[in-house]
Amino acid sequence: MFKTIGVFGKYRDATIEAPLKTLTEHLESKGIEVKLGYTTAAEITRDLPQKRLQEHLYQDIDLAIVIGGDGTMLHVARRMAESEVPIVGVNLGRLGFLTDIAQSDMLAEIDAILAGDYVIETRMMLDVDISRNGDKLYRQSALNDIVIGRHAVERLIHWQVHVNGQFVTSARSDGVILATPTGSTAYALSAGGAIMHPGIDVISMVPVSPHTLYNRPITLPGDATLDITIHNRTPDVAHVSADGLIGINLKGDEKVTVTRSQNAVKLVHTESYNYFSMLRAKLGWGSAQQ
Amino acid sequence: MFKTIGVFGKYRDATIEAPLKTLTEHLESKGIEVKLGYTTAAEITRDLPQKRLQEHLYQDIDLAIVIGGDGTMLHVARRMAESEVPIVGVNLGRLGFLTDIAQSDMLAEIDAILAGDYVIETRMMLDVDISRNGDKLYRQSALNDIVIGRHAVERLIHWQVHVNGQFVTSARSDGVILATPTGSTAYALSAGGAIMHPGIDVISMVPVSPHTLYNRPITLPGDATLDITIHNRTPDVAHVSADGLIGINLKGDEKVTVTRSQNAVKLVHTESYNYFSMLRAKLGWGSAQQ
Amino acid sequence: MFKTIGVFGKYRDATIEAPLKTLTEHLESKGIEVKLGYTTAAEITRDLPQKRLQEHLYQDIDLAIVIGGDGTMLHVARRMAESEVPIVGVNLGRLGFLTDIAQSDMLAEIDAILAGDYVIETRMMLDVDISRNGDKLYRQSALNDIVIGRHAVERLIHWQVHVNGQFVTSARSDGVILATPTGSTAYALSAGGAIMHPGIDVISMVPVSPHTLYNRPITLPGDATLDITIHNRTPDVAHVSADGLIGINLKGDEKVTVTRSQNAVKLVHTESYNYFSMLRAKLGWGSAQQ
Amino acid sequence: MFKTIGVFGKYRDATIEAPLKTLTEHLESKGIEVKLGYTTAAEITRDLPQKRLQEHLYQDIDLAIVIGGDGTMLHVARRMAESEVPIVGVNLGRLGFLTDIAQSDMLAEIDAILAGDYVIETRMMLDVDISRNGDKLYRQSALNDIVIGRHAVERLIHWQVHVNGQFVTSARSDGVILATPTGSTAYALSAGGAIMHPGIDVISMVPVSPHTLYNRPITLPGDATLDITIHNRTPDVAHVSADGLIGINLKGDEKVTVTRSQNAVKLVHTESYNYFSMLRAKLGWGSAQQ
């Protein structure tokens, strides 16, 4: 069972103070040790004991609870993945793709989880490795997507991609998104990609505003190795980011390799969770007809 | 090894006679027994012995060779799937998604296959079952797609779909496509779906011209059970077809169930085959930059 | 001013009876002669005097009021266009693209119109003329669109188009839509067309699920003459309809000509009308940020 | 007639030297005074007299001939627009949307133009004006498009737009394109916009990868005034450019106004020019069927 729980609040958002206090008191009343995430603890100190503050606590907790939006959830989930800590998200009023528990149901849902009434859903992640002549320059993991996007506003990116060593295509575009099924409902969807059920093991490659109209999204096996190279004549046209975090600019002589991560995120869901209900609510899909 | 080979030509196309004769003589010169597909034999009788003619020969052959386009290939592959006969396609001048051997390379490629230099690629198929109050009305398999499309030209189809018993969405549209990865480059692509690598185990659901703009393609696990129901007030608005074959009209009180088929198509490829090269050629994708 | 007003209700919808009675009594109390549309009068006879019933009354009225949805509005507007009778739409609870007056505001809005507080917005229409060897086979007008769509469910339409005598393109697709700006938010939008402000004088040509990915919507000058021909080998693959009405099947040797109609629809708007507000409400567009 | 002709070559491209020399000698042999564009003359000095060099010569010439691609053409055309100098484009081997004369036909086509066998096609331009509290910060014209795009790679732009003072929509996206019909086949097409025939007077607004799926391209009357404001909490998220030129970053308190320019580009076409042929060649559209 969950004896030590880490609680993480949305960064620099004062509205989390009340639910955070409610939650921690509730957990402690049940004899559970609560530790606050580092930034959360640094911000929210008024009524919460200082001893909870710990910088790297991921190995020490059995469960992570996030109070915030999908952005906070993405951030914490990436860090939990390494130590295989399961994670559950409580939204602040607006249903998220990842934060499916409403604040009003928080205590009841958490109690259900503490009582063992939950399932773990594993979500694949992607790793991006950037190297130049074999020297490693950058490495990051992403739960949503790796994006190679425009850094120089006035230029298209000329890129090409190999999959498992086989040349696939070259294109000029605003960028290219490599998305997990989790990320298929994020930026990849805006760029015209299809939604991927989280139960499938795939990597979606979605070109962004491709110059050539027939460069369409392609979905690849989850165990594929994607190598992307940049072919602009001038450097610093392209930028690589993971889950929207600032990454690095590319000179053009790097190799950008994207593969499925060895780590995965373990989402905790109670029985109130339903993937398709969430999609309908988030995307405005039609309701059942009588 | 392949001792008995079935040869199938494009239906009602006189241009197949020459390559068909070349191929059968070549195979027979190597001691292989050749059997012509029923319609092929019925049409092409001039120089080819009548004894080859057999109606249902699928259990009796070790390999099927198709000379024609993707349409012929789809048709024959569906029938081979049941008896697990591997199949290879020779195109008539225009590269197909499924008929990857050029006519000019036919004998060399077939010799390579006879010498054992080939791989088998398994392609999943879909089954559609249509029932009313438990009575089975229709069953068909498809290598590309099951399409629920408009029969009455002036009306949109009101449909809704459940996946594994869970309600997903309702929509009004020209139709909905349930596609295999093989079919993802056919009608589903025209309707805005993403390309699915044949190595992944998924079913793509692609609404056709949906009235509500946010009904986007969704890709589901290959083992999902999709139940589609029609909710128009008038009957015969919708029609179900498999791989473009005429199917049946729906009254509206049927249940249309789509699942992965137990059978699969076994495509034979020589080392000259490369999925991504084929995509580039078919879709006009960019070539490698120096 | 408006001395004689025609009132048209949604076909076979009993819920219009109450607002219809309210409206006609209100108008008559102001000394206005009210005439009911033919089908409306035939259905709703209980409390409404029989003398109002007249079959072809379009020349005899100064204003048409429609109570119903966009479908009813399209139908009546097309008929009013010839006699240049202005028209206003009252919706039955759900805002329409064309029926912008809410039922709850009906009497106040109609009073504003009677008081002269309104503007007339002219909406272009399209004519479709179908001929074979110079013989005219069919002619219809449309406020939304002319659609050449699939009649035979299993086949793509092979079509080509000339504009002002110049060859534009050939394509294989589910069909092609020729839309007015009014129709740009209807079927053309579902098929991937752009929204056209009604103040511009254009004809949008939108291919439906084109087989070749680069066949994109193109918007042409309003005075263009579009000639479409069908090139399937078998007849009756294509069907032409206007505003969703059943039209005729094409054998393949016809010429289908689409031009801007000499007639136009005159929509009456009060000052409460705002095109962009209507779009936001209908399409779910974002509201203003503070 | 054309007595003084300005000749402009692609910037920093040595391959223009030969056709440039051929062209200028040909023109001078006919008694026409030739002036080289400033950058062109500065680069190509070997065999061409220095006296041709003049920095601001736009008022002094009767015709501009561009040898290069669409980029060069865009650049020169924008400058010619003010002084109403007609312009014609010769491509360097690859047909352009704007440079329709093949190098091999150059002398014959130019002779036709000199003989008066040409038409002038007027292409509208857009002006963008950026101001803060009434202070003008930036002004630029564009033949293709005004783009408000991401400057900060990791953030979406929150923007909203008013047309003629009426609120239209707010959205979060990678950016928004305001395109002329000329620009409708450039970036706007990649971002999902429809093609606009150059004979129509419209401004296309195309959101780039909008977060909300129903924010679709909308085409507005050419005389519309578009006011765009940025609503991100952090400055410098958005950047405004005209025809791909580096423009300025936005703090967020600016008003960006886009209107049709008073100037227009006058393209010179010989009878060999055909807009639809050019589209077919550039976009891979289908050829006429027999």
Image: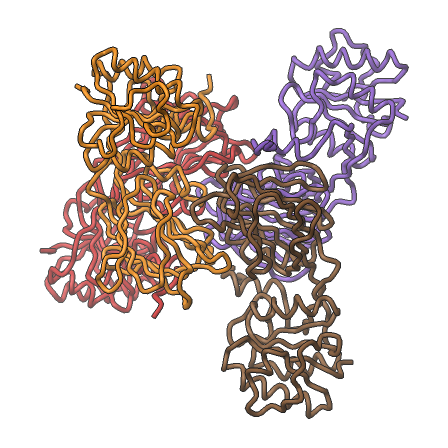
Chain colours: A purple, B brown, C orange, D red
**Image coordinates for residue B149, horizontal then vertical, percent:** 52, 50
Q: Residue at x 41, y 47 (%)?
A: D189
Left or right: A199 as drawn, with respect to C130:
right
**Image coordinates for residue B206, horizontal then vertical, percent:** 57, 47
Q: Nearer the viewer, residue C111 or D8?
A: C111
Picture quadrant where residue B140 is located: bottom right
Left or right: C288 as drawn, with respect to B249:
left
Position of the N terminus of chain A, as image quadrant, is top right
**Image coordinates for residue B40, horizontal then vertical, percent:** 59, 80
Using the image, determine if residue C177 lies above or below residue C133.
above
Q: Nearer the viewer, residue A228 or C269?
A: C269
Position of the C terminus of chain A, as image quadrant, is top right
Q: Residue at x 27, y 41 (%)?
A: C125
Q: Residue at x 41, y 54 (%)?
A: C215
Does the rendering let one see residue B200? yes
Using the image, determine if residue D278 lies above or below residue B55.
above
Using the image, determine if residue C199 lies above or below residue C34.
below
Q: Residue at x 61, y 53 (%)?
A: B179
